[in-house]
Image (cartoon, rainbow, N blue to C red):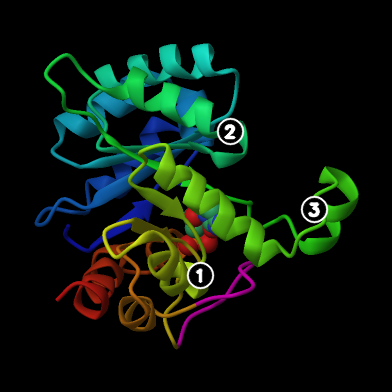
Amino acid sequence: MGKDVIIACDFDSAEKTFAFLDKFTGRKPFVKIGMELYYAEGPSIVKEIKKRGHKIFLDLKLHDIPNTVKKSMAVLSRLDVDMTNLHAGGTIRMMEAAIEGLTREDGTRPMLIAVTQLTSTDQESMENDLLIKEPIDKVVMHYAHNAKVAGLDGVVCSPLEAGKVHDTCGKDFVTVTPGVRFADGDIGDQKRVMTPAEAKKIGSDYIVVGRPITAAADPVAAYERCIAEFVD
Ligand code: C5P
């Protein structure tokens, strides 16, 4: 599977998204569409971006009863996205139902990735709010293993966890890692960051990069720099 850089298109309108994507006249980047943009513009934004030749990671993090997730995944699959995701906390049965829904009549399907514990959840909130008393690293690896058992392709995780996920779930189990920053760039609100080169070294398969590209003075140059550090 090929390593790639996924740009997080965290914009609140189609207009801003297209103004940004119009700058990329050469290589068409793999883009991530999250809840903000999807809820603002609906499925048409996915179809439009796909028509322009971009691969799409639809980051909607589904979590519901298995039947609802299965039917919703069938709808997302028809949108022809390349990758989508759900919460592993929805149980193995929910993840298996998601795969069923996502699989098209010809047997193909988008890649399906699980969120383990959100990086905004720490040990304290997991213990006090969720009543999960195990160490958070163990919980993350257990959820990753559940995703593998259910037949998913990989997980979203911190670049710092990517190596351990590969050790636990195998080399082919994909790691998609946000929290990437250039060595000379702003960290912003991310706490644990890595450069694209470090993420490559540690074994991330895909890096998700938002503001270091979207807020750069020259977004295309910032994207090419990520590609040069991470892929080439
Ligand atoms: O702008 P920045 O590079 O921080 O954007 C990272 C993207 O990855 C955002 O869309 C953010 O929501 C997402 N993300 C993250 N950390 C996670 C999961 C997703 O930063 N644990």
Locate the C terminus and report the quarter of the image it occupies: bottom left
Q: Looking at the magenta stretch, what is its main secondary structure? A: loop
Residue indicated by mark 3: 126
Q: Secondary structure at mark 2?
A: loop
Residue indicated by mark 2: 91
Residue indicated by mark 1: 161
Residue 29's disc number: none
* Residue 59 rendering spot, x and y as whole percentages: 45, 39
Q: Quadrant of residue 184?
A: bottom left
Q: Which residues are magenta?
A: 184-193
User: If you read the primary sequence from the N terminus, does the residue marked by circle 1 or circle 2 appear first?
Assistant: 2
* Residue 190 rendering spot, x and y as whole percentages: 61, 68
Q: Is residue 81 above or below residue 164?
A: above
Mark 2 nearby-residue class (10 Å; few <14, some 14–19, many ≥20): some
Q: Is residue 18 above or below residue 122?
A: above
- Camera-side residue of 157 and 190: 157
Q: Residue at x 47, y 62 (%)?
A: 178
Separation of residues labelled 2 and 3 (CA atoms): 17 Å
